[in-house]
Image (cartoon, rainbow, N blue to C red):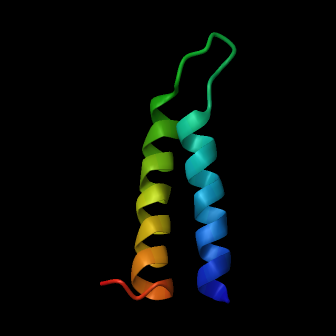
Amino acid sequence: MVDIVFVLITGFVAYHGLTYRDEEGESDIGHLLFGAIALLFCLRILFVDILNLV
């Protein structure tokens, strides 16, 4: 149950970080960085701990 909640939260953080734009339509490097890191954690927990693929 904790793994599923972790995947949902990190998935939301990754989505927000990778799609965030400011008023001028530019991406912030901090949002992109943390979004990419959150995506890596999300996929790692999903594939290794939940789906047991590795």
Q: Residue at x 61, y 14 (%)?
A: 25
Residue 53 position (above or below residue 31): below
- Between 49 and 27, the one nearer to me in the picture: 49
The quarter of the picture where the N terminus appears is bottom right
Pick the quarter of the image with the C terminus. bottom left
Q: Height in image: 21 above or below 11?
A: above
Left or right: 50 in relation to 11: left
For the point 50% across and 66% down, which residue is it?
42
Q: Residue furthest left?
A: 54
Hey, which residue is sitting farthest top in the picture? 24
Percent position of residue 32, x then y: 47, 38
Task: Give residue 9's position: percent from left, percent from top.
Answer: 66, 65
On screen, 20 above or below 12?
Answer: above
Residue at the (55%, 17%) spot, across then down: 26
User: Which residue appears at 65% of the width and 55% of the height?
Assistant: 12
Image coordinates for residue 31, horizontal then vertical, percent? 53, 38
Q: Position of residue 30 (x, y in %)?
A: 48, 37
- The image shows a total of numbered marks equal to 0
